Every structure is written in C-alpha cells, then in structure tokens.
Image (cartoon, rainbow, N blue to C red):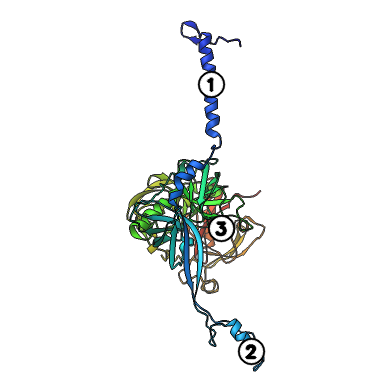
Amino acid sequence: MTSQVISIAVPGAQARLRPVWALMLAVALVLGQASLALARAAPESFADLADQVSPAVVNITTSTTIAGHTGVTPMVPEGSPFEDFFRDFMNPEGPDGQRPPRRSQALGSGFVISPDGYIVTNNHVIEKADEIEIEFFSGQILEATVVGTDAKTDIALLKIESDDPLPFVPFGDSDAMRVGDWVMAMGNPLGQGFSVSAGIVSARGRALSGTYDDYIQTDAAINRGNSGGPLFNMEGEVVGVNTAILSPTGGSIGIGFAMSSAVVTNVVDQLKEFGETRRGWLGVRIQDVTPDMAEALGLEKARGALVTDVPEGPAAEAGMESGDVILSFDGADVADTRGLVRRVGNTAVGKSVEVTVFRNGEIETLAITLGRRETAEGAVPAVASPDSAPPQEREMLGMTLSPVTDELRQQLDLGATAEGLVVKDIDEMGEAYEKGLRAGDLITEAGQRKVASVKDLTDRIEEARDAGRKSLLLLVRRQGEPRFVALSVVEKG
C-alpha cells in the first residue's frame, strides 16, 4: 500500500507529516467509524439484562368478590314438567333465585422499587380488588396492600412485608430517551409469567386520553397481562410503566404505550407520602394559541396558553385576566396547554411561582401561590358583569348577531347575568362556521374587551383594521364553556 503525505499550513512555514503519522491518522479514523457503528448496533443479547432485573419484576394476581344476582327463569306453563327443571337449572341455589357471591381473578405485572417492599403497577390492575398476591421470579408469593392510586395516570403503589430486603430496580430518566433507543419490556402477558420482549422507542410524548399523559410508544411486544410491568433502558433502569396497547384485534401489533418515568416518579412520591396525589392548581381555563390567534393578539408566533376564563382561585387572586397568554411558568417556557397542565400539576401545592403573561401587547409577571387541584375540581367560573345596550340585530363576519335579551336568555338558558352577542344564524360556507361557531353561541369579548352591542363589535373590528391586524380574537361561550376564535377582518374588494 502506498502511503500518502498530508500537508498542512502553519504560519510562516510548510510542515509535512511523515507517512507513519498519516497511517496513524487513517487508523484512528477507521476505529472511530467502527465505534460509531457499534454504538448504533443492536445488543448482542438481552440475557444479561434480563438476569439483572428479573428478581425485581413480579406477577400480580387479584381477586374480586362479585355480588350474587337473581337468575332469570324462562316462562313455561304453570304445572309443566319443565317448570322444576328450568328453575333448578337457571337458579341452582334455591327458589328465591339468588345466586351466591362469586370470585373473579385478574392478572397483571409490577416491579419492586425499594428493598422495603414498595411495588408499582397500574391502577386498573388492582382496582376494586379484595386480595392482591405478588409472585416473585423465585416463586415466593406474598400478599400486598394498596398504599394509594391515581386514576388520572393509571398508577398504583402497593406494599408488601418481608423479613429480608427485597431486590428492586431504580427509575431512569425517560426524558433522556430518544426515538430509536433500545428498550426491554418484562411482565406477565396472557398469564404466561416473566416474559421478556425487546424493541425500540417508536415515539415520545404520546397522549391517549388523560390530562397528564406522557407515554413512550414502543414496538416491544406488550399484551394483556403486561399492564403495570416495567419498560427498561439498557442500563436496567425503569423508564416507563407498560399501560396500554393499540390494536384492532386485542393482541400486540407493535404499538404499545408505557407511562414515562418522569410522570410516574412524581406520582409515586406523592402516593408514598400522602396516600393520594396533591397536584398544583393554577385556576384557569386555557386553550392553545393558533397562528391566526397569535396574529390577532400581536404575538410574534403561536406559543403559550391562552386564558379563556379565570374562576375564583389562585390566578384570579393574583390578577390574571381572560385573554392573557401564559408564556412561562415557574421559570420554564410554556409551549402549549398540555405542557402547562403537566408542569402545574407537578408543582407542589402552596408553592409561590412566577407566571409571565402577554397582555395587550405588554409582558407582565404575576406571583401566584398554587392551590390544590383535587379540592378545586368544582370551582365555579367567573361571570361577566352586565353591560347594558339597546337591542340591535345585524349580519357581520358571516353571522347574524343580536344582543342578549331576556327572551334569548330563557331560550338558550344563558343565565340572568349573561351579556354579549348571540349568534342567531350563521353562514355554513363562511369562516366562522368553519372554525366551529354555531347558532346559539354567545360572543362575550372581541379584541379582549367586552361586547354587549353590535356597535361594540363594529368598533373592535375597525380598531383591529386600523392597527394593521388581519384577525380579531373573539371569546365565545357555549353552554358556559369558553374558548377563543380568531376571525379575519380583512375587507374584501
């Protein structure tokens, strides 16, 4: 092989690398490429990892008592020879037809998180269970008690008593996982017990139906019975709790979901300390900011969480207003409503936080002491104060609008203090209909100011046009629920 001489420029002179240095450089380059390829290659085997974690993974069997019920006897002619037969067959426990209570069993998975016997699983695995049995890989069986549950994240914390320290597995950082990283699931699929499957992280940040959802999606095989089992990274750390599958057949098709450890660890800490969750509560109703809303508000880009309503609570006490856009919470930027809800929920009750809002083109910072969400679920929304205006109906923005009258209050069940413009009719081919407005909706604000008459809305439209804005932000209420909608105010030639 012919060695090449590599020349490099140095100030004031030309230096030559000897052929041996060139060869060493080439070897280093080859080794570096080999290391990179090795880092991306599939593990040779998952056997060592399975041996490492299996003592801490458990099978869970639950028993539930189902109350007896009265059987149904087919109608047969009185005195028929079949009368006694059907009565005994359909209601074997006696003439009153009352069947005795029966036991129902269910299977799931879990894992030990501490040597003193705390176990994590899914809430739906142990919900309504009378007895919970924990089976270890060694064959040992112990009874467990429920420490606490959280239906919102489908997490439950159990406790078993043991004379000896138990094997356990630590939590890992789910936020550090990347799409394409290897993961391994372990559990009790279809009652088979201590089964291992492997795959990769298919996606992150998945939401199914819950407010606090943050699922890791994986193609590692997950089936019924895997619920509550751990999803491991290659260091043997739990980065998710296997919870659900997406399947038209009920079997694994490679789309499984594990609740991220970032969510689980916070829930487990609260269940261990309080026996229940205690989530922070800001006290606002919010919606995502769309690009046309951002333009109407004067924001440079669509971001943050738009406040649609401020019921009585922490935010109202701190001076937050409907129409504010929450840009940061407790020092962290807010990208959208989902991120804000998760961050607030993970913040300690009673903590004072700084919340930055965008209001009327200005940035303001509010100091808010968080309440507790669990005790504030029934908070009553704030009611807009009345603002008198003479009735006047008009067609505009693709809608027929009318100020609220006593007759409309009664027809639409708006409440005695409701004020604004009622959508009496709407052009189904227009922008307003396309963006979800319907007849019967109540427009209470335009341009973040109250409207009680058609003239108020007309003035807001002209002000938006004079300011060079293409859209006007409307606050719309339907059956008391508020949301913002941005409609175009550009005049058509």
Instruction: Confirm or deny contact between disc 2 and disc 1 (CB under 8 A).
Output: no
Dot 2 or dot 1, earlier in sequence? 1
Q: Within 10 Å of the Cα at label 2, are there few (<14), some (14-19), or many (20+) other Cα atoms?
A: some
Q: Name the mark on residue 229.
A: none
Q: CA distance from mark 3 to mark 1?
A: 49 Å
To which residue does mark 3 refer? 190
To which residue does mark 1 refer? 29
Q: Is residue 58 left or right of residue 23?
A: left
To which residue does mark 2 refer? 83
Dot 3 or dot 1, earlier in sequence? 1
Q: CA distance from mark 3 to mark 2?
A: 42 Å
Residue 236 visible in rendering: yes
Work out which residue is located at the far bottom of the displayed protein and give it.
79
Residue 466 location (% of width, % of height): 53, 47
Instruction: Confirm or deny contact between disc 3 and disc 1 (CB under 8 A).
Output: no
Q: Amino acid at mark 1?
A: Leu
Instruction: Answer above or below: position of 235 versus 122.
Output: above
